């Protein structure tokens, strides 16, 4: 099954993208693109790149808490290489795995790299929950459901963020207290090490402020990137619509059924925006425009992968 699963994910991505292409009215889409503001599209790309930069800074801060001091050029090289592979591998964490292996080959501890990557993703998830909850509570009318249901949903998302902030630090303490002294080898030792590292990330609790703040800012920039691209394509959609819809789209991507979210992200974008009142063809066009912008945004990963890849091969050949 493990060998078949990647092919299933690729098939799902191809099928979902194919369905969008079939429903797209290319003539209408070209008219929409012709009327789109090029500066807004460029701004969308710029905001996405800045969001990546802030996410990288968050990861640096988290790695420093477990003693990982990685030189800047090497870190950003591994980071953008990981971003690139997150788009082309049939796994939602494929890019994280590539980044960890990239650095582990340079003698950095794999355990600390993996745990810091998982915690980094955890904070990204919390940022989505927080922004989505706040947006719904501020503008409950953007959802086509009863206002009291909107308020319940917004409160639930905020509660999920707060619960996550409360739970994970205590999870590390609980794991260490329960298994730390019972298992001293194999998976037990790894579990104890991971629990200790989780404690290092979150204790004292004031350490939560910086990564949570960076998560809210970076996720907010991603949403603004969508809004900038969609401003002239979907003039009836307000900023509040994007701050409600995009966290929902990104939360759907947690479900590992496609190749790096490809196809699933675009279908979710169309579905949620149309549900909230957007024109179907305009929403389809926006989903494909943002897909292209997302691919462009990870192009630096090609340069870093080639640069460090060739350097690594050269070093191995010299050692031989």
Image (cartoon, rainbow, N blue to C red):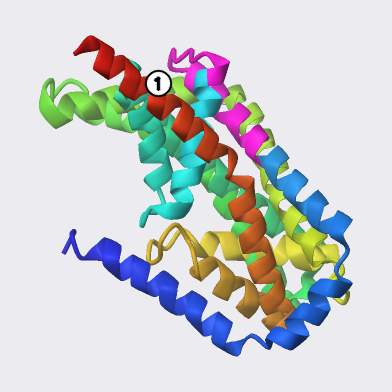
Query: 10 Å neighbourhood of mark 1: few (<14), some, or many (≥20)?
Result: few
Tell me if residue 152 can be seen: no
Of residues 299 and 273, the one drawn nearer to the viewer in this rendering: 299
Establish if 154 lies above or below 106: below
- Residue ID for mark 1: 311
Which span of residues is magenta-colored?
52-73
- Please tell me whether residue 44 belongs to the stretch shown in magenta: no
Report the quarter where the N terminus lies.
Answer: bottom left
At 44% across and 57% down in the image, what residue appears?
Answer: 260
Judged from the image, the secondary structure of the residue bearing numbered disc 1 is helix
At 80% across and 52% down in the image, what residue appears?
Answer: 42
In the image, taking residue 211 as reference, residue 98 lies left or right, namely left
At 38% across and 61% down in the image, what residue appears?
Answer: 256
- Please tell me whether residue 72 belongs to the stretch shown in magenta: yes
Place of residue 286 in the rendered image (x, y in percent of width and height, measured from the top left): 71, 70
Tell me if residue 313 can be seen: yes
């Amino acid at each position: 099954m493990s060998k078949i699963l990647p092919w299933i994910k690729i098939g799902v991505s191809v099928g979902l993208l194919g369905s969008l292409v079939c429903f797209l009215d290319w003539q209408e889409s070209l008219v929409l693109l012709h009327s789109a503001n090029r500066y807004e599209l460029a701004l969308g790309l710029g905001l996405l790149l800045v969001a990546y930069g802030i996410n990288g800074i968050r990861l640096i801060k988290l790695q420093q808490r477990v003693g990982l001091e990685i030189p800047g050029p090497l870190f950003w090289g591994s980071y953008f290489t990981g971003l690139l592979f997150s788009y082309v591998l049939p796994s939602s964490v494929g890019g994280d795995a590539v980044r960890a292996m990239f650095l582990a080959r340079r003698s950095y501890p794999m355990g600390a790299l993996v745990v810091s990557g998982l915690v980094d993703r955890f904070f990204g998830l919390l940022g989505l929950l927080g922004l989505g909850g706040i947006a719904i509570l501020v503008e409950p009318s953007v959802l086509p459901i009863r206002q009291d249901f909107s308020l319940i949903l917004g409160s639930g998302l905020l509660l999920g963020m707060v619960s996550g902030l409360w739970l994970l630090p205590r999870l590390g303490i609980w794991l260490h207290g329960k298994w730390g002294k019972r298992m001293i080898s194999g998976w037990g030792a790894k579990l104890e090490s991971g629990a200790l590292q989780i404690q290092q990330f979150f204790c004292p609790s004031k350490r939560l402020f910086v990564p949570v703040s960076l998560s809210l800012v970076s996720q907010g920039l991603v949403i603004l990137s969508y809004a900038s691209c969609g401003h002239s394509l979907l003039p009836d959609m307000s900023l509040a619509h994007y701050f409600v819809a995009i966290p929902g789209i990104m939360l759907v991507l947690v479900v590992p059924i496609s190749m790096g979210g490809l196809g699933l992200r675009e279908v979710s974008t169309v579905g949620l925006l149309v549900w909230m009142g957007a024109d179907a063809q305009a929403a389809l066009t926006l989903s494909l425009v943002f897909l292209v912008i997302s691919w462009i945004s990870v192009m630096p990963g090609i340069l870093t992968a080639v640069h460090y890849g060739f350097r690594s091969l050269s070093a191995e050949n010299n050692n031989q």
